[in-house]
């Protein structure tokens, strides 16, 4: 091959270099987000039968489970047309809370205001994500996927309380 056959136009070379640099920047950003900042994506925790999940433990009694008093909690939430069960609950400020959410009917979304908790609630799949509430107050959660005519009323809230019990 001669030098003329390998000629790359300067504009093409600039675009290739810029593209490679962007890929490197994106890779570094993902590594920093995942390893240094602790940002996590929702995971598929387990599979369940959406037809019978509401009759099986722990889903037969969804709600808050205290693992370490005042420090660590699990919350099991069932999404179904057009509600979340439970639709309200309390946890103390500073507690590490792991959410387990599944759907009994159609695809739903679960977005908890001012947190990293935002994922799909799919029939047959349990989604899991952990967050820590640093500020007391009431945090709303909503369904972010259109699931039918009652979608607009599909919401709930978490009350995060001070150690003395005040929000």
Image: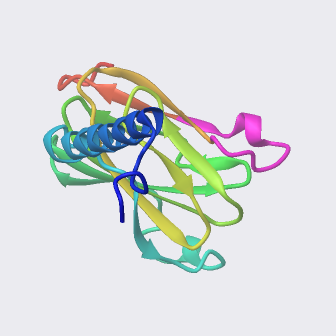
Residue ID at (21%, 46%): 31
Residue 22's place in the image compared with 34, above or below, is above
**Count of marks, rendered view:** 0
Prevailing secondary structure class for the magenta stretch in the rendered image: loop
Residue ID at (34%, 53%): 3
Q: Is residue 149 shown left or right of residue 67? A: right
Residue 158 painted magenta: no
Q: Report the colour scheme.
A: rainbow
Which quarter of the image is occupied by the C terminus?
Answer: top left
Magenta residues, start to end: 144-156
Q: Nearer the viewer, residue 166 or 43?
A: 43
Q: Is residue 141 shown left or right of residue 104? A: left
Image position, residue 1 (x, y; %): 36, 66
Residue 107's place in the image compared with 138, above or below, is below
Image position, residue 161 (x, y; %): 29, 25
Residue 60 visible to an observer of this rendering: no
Residue 27 visible to an observer of this rendering: yes
Image position, residue 113 (x, y; %): 46, 28
Q: Is residue 78 shown left or right of residue 115? A: right
Q: Nearer the viewer, residue 92 or 128?
A: 128
Image position, residue 132 (x, y; %): 25, 37
Residue 148 painted magenta: yes
Residue ID at (63%, 40%): 144
Residue 85's place in the image compared with 29, above or below, is below
In which quadrant of the rendered view does residue 166 lie?
top left
């Amino acid at each position: 091959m001669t030098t003329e056959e390998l000629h790359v136009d300067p504009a093409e070379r600039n675009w290739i270099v810029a593209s490679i640099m962007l890929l490197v920047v994106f890779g570094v950003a993902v590594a920093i987000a995942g390893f240094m900042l602790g940002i996590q994506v929702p995971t598929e925790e387990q599979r369940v039968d959406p037809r019978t999940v509401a009759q099986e433990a722990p889903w037969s009694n969804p709600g808050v489970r205290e693992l370490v008093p005042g420090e660590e909690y699990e919350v099991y939430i069932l999404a179904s047309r057009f509600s979340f069960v439970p639709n309200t609950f309390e946890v103390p400020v500073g507690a590490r809370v792991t959410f387990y959410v599944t759907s009994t009917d159609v695809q739903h979304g679960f977005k908890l205001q001012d947190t990293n908790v935002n994922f799909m609630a799919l029939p047959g799949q349990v989604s899991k994500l952990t967050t820590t509430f640093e500020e007391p107050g009431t945090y709303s959660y909503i369904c972010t996927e259109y699931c039918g005519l009652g979608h607009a009323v599909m919401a709930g809230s978490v009350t995060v309380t001070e150690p003395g019990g005040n929000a």
